[in-house]
Amino acid sequence: MAKGRRKSTKRRTDGFRPLRWLRRWVLRLFLGFAVFVLLAVIGYRLLNPPTTYYMQQEKWRLGQVDHQWVPLDAVAPVMARSVVAAEDANFCNHWGFDMSAIRNAIADGGNRGASTLSQQVVKNVYLWHGRSWPRKALEAAITPLVEAVWPKRRIIEVYLNVAEFDEGIFGVEAAARHYFGIGPEALSPVQAARLAAVLPNPKERNAAKPSSWLRKRAAGIMDGAATIRRDGRADCFE
């Protein structure tokens, strides 16, 4: 009887394969993470993100932040065009990555940005700020999924509601009132262009008291916003 038990134990021990067990659990974890990401992307296609990780960081640091969600229909259309002109002129023509902008950035030695609005939305909503390969890898994986699930108009809407426009000022609603004392529906082309001009560096630029450089940048954005409206590059979100 004891001999039989030893043989049974030996068979069970011989049957355990650590590498196979590890591969199985890695696969389960990967599939679980993929399902979680898919549900998160689908969820924010329908629901508005109440906050982001970066907003919470700033709230902990500053004590409070100013943020109120506003639907895109309640924002002056020129604001969306201005952001696209400033940050991602080919927004309507790419699937999440602007390959021509990436090639130009590489040719320029990496001194210019090539991040699309879609990538920025993924970073702002699902990930964290900072330069790291893990974050960039996750951003590259999630961005095409967002492009596939969300319409372009939704991407613009979310971007305008989570972008930082000044220290502790998040979203176009808070930004319009903070800088100009008006609602986002009343933004003029000049005001929209100035808001778009502060986005790459909101803590050091002021839309209400623009420097000469920011005025010049805003003028270029105004021209760009008018151009993409004429040539159809704003059709996907208007």
Image (cartoon, grey):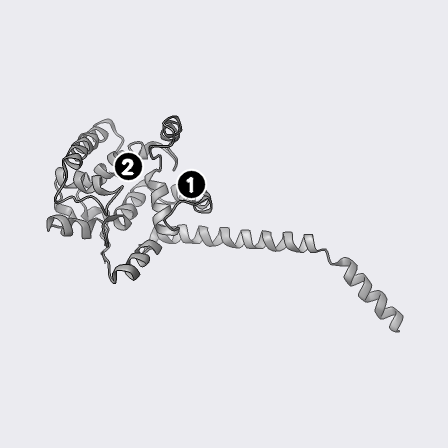
Left or right, residue 142 beside residue 7: left
Residue at the limit of the structure toward the left, as seen here? 181
Q: Residue furthest bottom?
A: 1
Is the residue marked by circle 1 packed among few (<14), some (14-19), or many (20+) residues within 10 Å? some
Report which residue position mark 1 lands on. 144
What's the distance in space between the residues labelled 1 and 2, CA to CA? 18 Å
Q: Residue 146: x and y, percent? A: 39, 44
Residue 13 image-quadrant placement: bottom right
In front: label 1 or label 2: 2
Task: Please name the residue shown 25% across and 60% down the image.
Answer: 62
Q: Amino acid at mark 2?
A: Glu
Residue 50 visible: no
Q: Residue at x 43, y 43 (%)?
A: 136
Place residue 87 in its image quadrant: top left
Q: Which residue is mark 2?
A: 87
Q: Nearer the viewer, residue 46 or 67?
A: 67
What residue is at 58 percent from the left and 54 percent from the top? 28
Q: Quadrant of the N terminus?
A: bottom right
